[in-house]
Image (cartoon, rainbow, N blue to C red):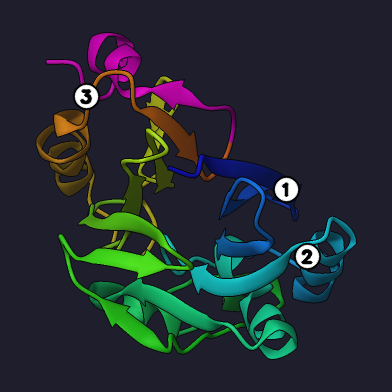
Amino acid sequence: MAKIKIGRLMMGICQTNCYFVYEEGKTDVIFIDPADQGGYLYDALKERGFSVAAIYLTHGHFDHIWGAEELRQKSGAKIYAYEGERALCMSDDLNVSARTGRACTIEPDVDLKDGEELTTIGITCKVIATPGHTSGSCCYYFPEGGFVISGDTLFADSVGRTDLPTGSMSELVRSIREKLFLLPDDTIVYPGHGEATEIGHEKQYNPFVVE
């Protein structure tokens, strides 16, 4: 069985983590959250010998979607997002981009459902709806790779903010406890900002969700 690999590029004013997932020895990648400068991201991957086959969004905030349209145009890849986030993706007020002076909206090509098993370029992940940071936030769990891409739901020893449109702290905590904490303890968590952590560590030490 081919080994699933993950790479990271940190981009933009919010230092957003952009991830690309691929099978060892292959060149097609799944790109998650093209934060900023889609053209730069496309070129940076091309220089490494990669091509973008699909674009997954964890949520629709400006710092995670600014580069999405340009990356879609250059790569021809479809954009996937959880169905509950479509309204936020398509509103520059809800996704906060209008406040930044760089208004942006994005229309996903594919709406995903909670619990859906999504297979692209031979790599399968499970879509986990995790409302809280936004009402349509989701995470992508790659069981073969032993990791989950958590967007702005779960961070190392912290959680995502909930003071922006559609956010809810009670929903966020419930999403983490009732969904992400069901994953194996050794699952690596790759968040939208900051460094990686593990589910087991967060279950024991995260002050926002430890009961």
Q: Are marks 2 and 3 in contact (CB under 8 Å)?
A: no
In 3D space, how far apart are the residues under numbered discs 1 and 2 (Cα atoms)? 8 Å
**Label 2 Cα crowd, 10 Å radius (few <14 / some 14-19 / many 20+):** many
Residue matched to label 2? 41
Residue 24 image position (x, y, % from top left): 61, 45
* Side of 144 where 130 appears, left or right: left
Marks 1 and 3, Cα distance to the nearest angstrom? 28 Å
> Where 207 sits versus 44, above or below?
above
**41 within the magenta span:** no
Disc number for residue 209: 3
Q: Which residues are magenta?
A: 194-211
Q: Of 49 and 179, which appears nearest the observer?
A: 49
Q: Label 1 amino acid?
A: Leu
Q: Position of residue 68 (x, y in %)?
A: 62, 76
Q: Quadrant of the C terminus?
A: top left
Write the residue at 16% across / 48% down: 171
Residue 9, labelled with which disc?
A: 1
71 vs 126, left or right, is: right
**Residue sitting at the far right:** 47
Q: Quadrant of the N terminus?
A: top left
Q: Residues within 10 Å of mark 1 (few under 14, many from 20)?
A: some
Splitting the image into 4 quarters, where does residue 81 fall?
Answer: bottom left
Is residue 16 in view? Answer: yes
Mark 1 or 2 closer to N-term?
A: 1
Identity of the residue drawn at 43% across and 85% down? 108
Distance from the alpha carbon under mark 2 to that under mark 3 = 34 Å
Q: Mark 1 touching mark 2, by CB under 8 A? A: yes
